[in-house]
Image (cartoon, rainbow, N blue to C red):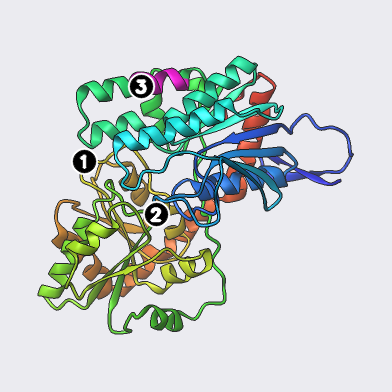
Amino acid sequence: MTTQKYEPQSGAFRVAGSGKVRDDLASVLVVGLNYAPEPTGNAPYTTKLAEGLAGLGHKVEVLTGYPHYPQWQVAEGYSGLSSHQIINGVPVRRLRHTVPAVPRTLNRLVMELTFGLHTALRRWPKRDIVLVVSPGLFASAFAVAKARLKGIPVAIWIQDLYSRGLEETGGSATATKAVKWIESKILRSCSGITVIHGRFRDYVVDELEVSRENVDVIRNWTHIQHDSVFDREAVRSRLGWSSEETIALHAGNMGVKQGLENVVEAARLADAFDSRVRFVLLGDGNRREALHVAGEGIRSLSFVKPLSDREYSEALRAADVLIVNERPELREMSVPSKLTSYFATGLPIVASTHPESATADEIRASDAGILVDPQRPSALLRGVERLRDNPAEAEALGSRGPIYAERVLSESAAIGAYSSWLASLSTGVPRALN
């Protein structure tokens, strides 16, 4: 059987067909709350990584929860305490957990704890290494503890920093200190850690007191594949978007940290000034209903329910401007996963975010968009109008996104790096990637 090995020095895969047992492959148990068919958040990345590792020859199995995000209810067709599927060649064991109808800190914690406990009680297949995905952090604690008890190397993949999130969203000092201590203990118990951005690594090292040698950065990648056959006008017509309107689209989760009330107010201003800008919120989340209520009667605001991957790709590319919106106090807690898909479209981005945020760093690094004041809806509207009225600038910014995505956010490079990283950790001889 022919397999491939990733060589980080050359950035390529080496084909090997000797048929011998190879020491660069590991059997991997992936433990994470979110997985396909969930369309957004960290689920697409966990799914693609599991499938990519399997494609490189690793033996991969997944322990995950029941699909529930971002609609916050278990998807139709899933019942019982556990279920088993084969998804694109990867064995997936689903474990039941609570799902809060209205996600708040306490009931989300209960959800994580029920999933974590179910994970710990489940018999695990024998594997060389366990890869835990966070969020959820508290579910991860069970998996990390069980792996250590079984003497299996355990790695953790950090997509979000809980303690930093509490700091930035106004959590109490006592709660923040407690979560920071728990997060530090969990991370320091792992054989290796990957984070999705250099800013995350600095926080993990400086604030959570993890050895820098144990923390690597492997970037998230563009998980949406854009089909070259695309009728832009037909898609706009299907979505009810006039050719005379400038479509400013925000895609993904509609939660608290996105602060999408800012977009609603920008749309209200667009009505007041007859701006001909339509703001579109695509996706779902626990704030969707409240945003609907807040936006009632605003002509320049539309909502689109979650779409299939193909329809999602088409909707992104049918827009004129893509929007990232974050609460103004957010700086370190996360890097929006939507950015990886945005960059690949070739459209300009308007980011309403704090100028010192990790998101702002991404926009500056890619030079694929502009930054506006997240505390002023008028700044968001003016940013969209600026790109509408300056098509040469919009085209130049948009053209840099795919270049950045290919250079920095390549799926093959990321999965190859994970392959090498996990194989090295499974032997007990970790090797820093960067």
Horizontal and vertical percent position of residue 86: 68, 49
- Which of 121 and 212 lies nearest the eye of the viewer? 121
Q: Which disc, if any, is residue 206?
A: 3
Name the residue at 35% across, 51% down.
363
Question: As shown in the figure, which amino acid type bears the numbered disc 3?
Answer: Asp
Q: Which residues are magenta?
A: 180-187
Question: As shown in the figure, which amino acid type bears the numbered disc 2?
Answer: Gln
Name the residue at 79% across, 44% down.
3
Tell which residue pokes out farthest to the left in this image. 272
Give the alpha-carbon distance from disc 1 to disc 2, as whole Å. Answer: 25 Å
Q: Is 328 left, or right, of 8 in this rendering?
A: left
Instruction: Name the quadrant containing residue 150.
Output: top right
Horizontal and vertical percent position of residue 302: 28, 71
Q: Is 126 left, or right, of 191 in this rendering?
A: right
Q: Which disc, if any, is residue 116?
A: none
Horizontal and vertical percent position of residue 394: 33, 68
